[in-house]
Image (tube, helix red, strand yellow):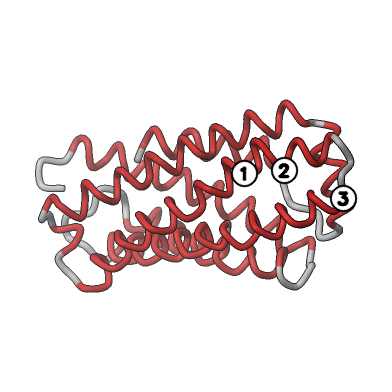
Amino acid sequence: MAIASVLLAGVLIGHGPIHPDVSRQLEVIAEGSVRWAIVHWAAAAALSLFAITGLIVLTARSRLTQEWWTLSAWGVITVGALWTMTTAVAEATVVTDAAVARDIGRFEAWWAFSEGKATGFMFLALAVAVIAGNEAISARAATPAWASWIAMLAGTGSFLGWPLGMWFGIYLGSILWVLSSLMMSAWTLWFGLGLMKSKSG
C-alpha cells in the first residue's frame, strides 16, 4: 500500500484535472503524449499494488476486516483497483495513439470506455473513506485519529469530485478529485507504513 500510494501521488500530479470538453482533452493528451503514457503505466502499476494489498488484507484475518463495513471496503478496493487498471492501460496505449493521430472518432469511443471503467476509482476512494473512518475510532489505529478523519473527508471528496467533473462537466469537480485523491494518497502512504510497523495490524 505504501508503494502504491507513492506511485499514485506521482500519477495524480502528472495527470492533473480532466477537461470536460473531450476535444480539449484530446489536445492535452496529444501535446503531452509521452507523459500521458508514462503516467498511465505508473497508474496501472499503482492500481495493481492496491489490488494485491486488498487481497492480502482480505485473507489475513486481522482487525482490519473484523467489521462487515471494513471487510466490504477492502473488497471494493480490490475490485475497484482491478476495474480501473484497465482504464490506465487503455489510456497509455489506444487513447494516446488516437489523440496523437487526432482521430476524434476513435478517441471518443475509447475515452468513453476509459471513463466508464475509471468509475472503479470513485468507489476505491469511497472504500478508503470507510477504512479511514474506522481507523479514526479504532483503539489500535496505525495513524492518528485526526489524520484518519482528514483522510475520510479526502476519500469522500474524491468520490464526489469524479462524477462532478466527468458526469456533470464541472471543471472544479475534476480539480476537487485530483486534490482530494492526493490527500487520500498521503494518508494511505502513512497508513501502509504504520501497518508495516504494527505487530497487530
Q: Could you tell me the amino acid type at mark 3?
A: Ile
Query: Circle 1: is it few (<14), some (14-19), or many (20+) Cα within 10 Å?
Result: many
User: Of callouts 3 and 1, which one flags the residue occurring earlier in the amino acid sequence?
Assistant: 1
In the displayed structure, does residue 87 sit left or right of residue 48?
right
Q: Residue at x 14, y 58 (%)?
A: 63
Disc 1 is placed on an element classified as: helix
Q: Which of marks 3 and 2 is nearer the N terminus?
A: 2
Q: Tell me the quarter of the picture where residue 177 sits.
A: bottom right
Is label 1 in contact with label 2 (beta carbons under 8 Å)?
Answer: yes
The residue lying at 16 percent from left, 48 percent from top is 201
Question: Quick check: 34 above or below 194?
Answer: above
Q: Nearer the viewer, residue 105 or 160?
A: 105
What element does badge 3 sit on? Answer: helix
Q: Label 1 near label 3: C-beta < 8 Å?
A: no
Q: Which mark is residue 90?
A: 1
Residue 97: name its quadrant: top right
* Amino acid under disc 2: Val
Quadrant (top left/top right/bottom left/bottom right) for the N terminus: top left
Say which mark, if any, is on residue 95.
2
Q: What element carries label 2?
A: helix
Across and down, in percent, residue 140 comes to: 17, 55
88 above or below 170?
A: above
Look at label 1 and name its amino acid: Ala
Q: What is the distance, in whole Å, between disc 3 and disc 2 at their CAs?
A: 10 Å
Asked whether, in this view, residue 170 is left or right of residue 135, the answer is: right
Residues 144 and 151: in front is 151
Q: Which mark is residue 44?
A: none
**Residue 93 in the figure: left or right of residue 49:** right
Q: Mark 3 points at which residue?
A: 104
Q: Which residue is drawn at 65% across and 69% down?
A: 163
> How far across and how far down the image is residue 100, in percent?
83, 34
